[in-house]
Image: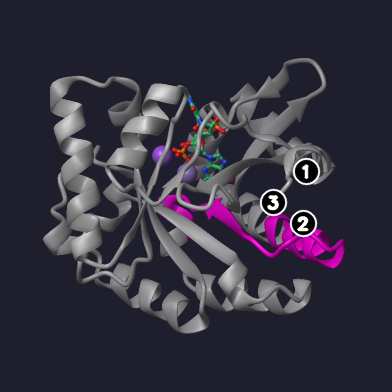
């Protein structure tokens, strides 16, 4: 396949970059972290969005190398911001299923933290609800090892799968990320779902972040419902690393 060959070439040529989207604490209005999002800059095709190349990278196995690069780059960048004197915040990376199930992942992450001199508490990994539901025993095993390492774990795209929070309470998670579709389509049903995710998460001692916050109304609703954190275009789109300092008043 054409795109597959291009993907291999891109890996060798370092044609990937990370963009960063800020996450805010709703009570203090402070930035508490950035989600790192991968971008592919292609000479002719321009910017290729992750929706198009992550699934392909998964299929071809290239996700292992790419995923490792993403973690390394995110940690390195975060450490750089800290060294420049910015307040310490988390950087959050998305892990794909194949990457998460790979043997040696936790050791590799531990090594990356050592190499980049980033304290583990400033790295967060995001796994999706569907990954958590795949029932493989080593998911809990791996999450426990991340937890022992001190790395934070967030459950991404929450609400799109069929897991109960009761089931998830067996997982060593720190945070639930409410999928943006529940925020953006504020139907009566979605409002009820968001409320119950927030209440149940808090009952289980989990933090909750809402994704896809685009309007003042979204923000007000989430503030009323005691949501902990927010992320979305209302605050900022994902931006290049060098732009982060522009709007980070921290
Ligand atoms: O940044 P954007 O909204 O276009 O991302 C689209 C999707 O691609 C999201 O689901 C996001 O989680 C995923 N994605 C972005 N960067 C990475 C990455 O580095 N690794 C993995 N596995 N997924 C990513
Ligand atoms: O699946 P995941 O949550 O990792 O997806 C992250 C993606 O969501 C990012 O690529 C980002 O571009 C996108 N995103 C972030 N905030 C918003 C928003 O407010 N509205 C929309 N439509 N997309 C958003
Ligand atoms: Mn994510
Ligand atoms: Na999500």
Q: Residue at x 61, y 67 (%)?
A: 122
Residue 232 position in % (x across, y down): 51, 32
Q: Residue at x 20, y 71 (%)?
A: 170
Q: Which residue is mark 2?
A: 77
Can residue 41 be seen from the camera position used here? yes
Q: Where 72 falls versus 109 (above or below)?
A: above
| Gap in angstroms between the C-alphas marked 1 and 3 | 15 Å
Q: Where 84 falls versus 57 (above or below)?
A: below
Pointer 1 with pointer 2, Cβ within 8 A: yes
Residue 241 position in % (x across, y down): 78, 43
Pointer 1 with pointer 3, Cβ within 8 A: no
Q: Which residues are magenta?
A: 73-99
Q: Residue at x 87, y 61 (%)?
A: 84
Residue 250: mark: 3
Which mark is first along the chain, 2 or 1? Answer: 2
| Label 2 crowd (10 A; few <14 / some 14-19 / many >=20) | some
**Quick one: SS at disc 2?**
helix
Judged left or right of residue 148, residue 205 is: left
Pointer 3 with pointer 2, Cβ within 8 A: no
Which callout, 3 or 2, points to the residue nearer the camera?
3
Q: Which residue is more in the foreground, 106 or 215?
A: 215
Q: Which residue is mark 1?
A: 241
Judged left or right of residue 164, residue 214 is: right
């Amino acid at each position: 396949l054409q795109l597959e060959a291009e993907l291999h070439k891109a890996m060798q040529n370092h044609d990937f970059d990370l963009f960063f989207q800020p996450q805010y604490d709703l009570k203090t209005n402070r930035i508490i972290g950035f989600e790192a999002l991968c971008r592919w800059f292609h000479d002719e095709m321009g910017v290729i969005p992750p929706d198009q190349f992550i699934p392909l990278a998964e299929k071809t196995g290239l996700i292992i190398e790419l995923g490792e690069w993403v973690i390394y780059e995110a940690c390195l960048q975060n450490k750089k911001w800290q060294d420049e004197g910015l307040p310490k915040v988390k950087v959050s990376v998305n892990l794909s299923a194949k990457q998460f199930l790979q043997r040696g992942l936790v050791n590799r992450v531990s090594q990356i933290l050592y190499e980049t001199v980033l304290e583990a508490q400033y790295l967060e990994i995001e796994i999706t609800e569907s990954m958590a539901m795949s029932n493989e025993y080593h998911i809990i095993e791996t999450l426990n090892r991340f937890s022992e390492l001190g790395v934070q774990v967030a459950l991404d795209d929450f609400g799109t799968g069929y897991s109960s929070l009761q089931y998830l309470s067996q997982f060593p998670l720190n945070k639930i990320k409410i999928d943006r579709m529940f925020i953006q389509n504020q139907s009566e049903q979605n409002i009820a779902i968001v409320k119950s995710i927030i209440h149940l998460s808090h009952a289980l001692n989990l933090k909750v972040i809402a994704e896809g916050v685009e309007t003042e109304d979204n923000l007000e609703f989430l503030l009323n419902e005691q949501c902990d954190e927010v992320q979305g275009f209302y605050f900022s789109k994902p931006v290049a690393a060098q732009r982060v300092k522009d709007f980070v008043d921290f």
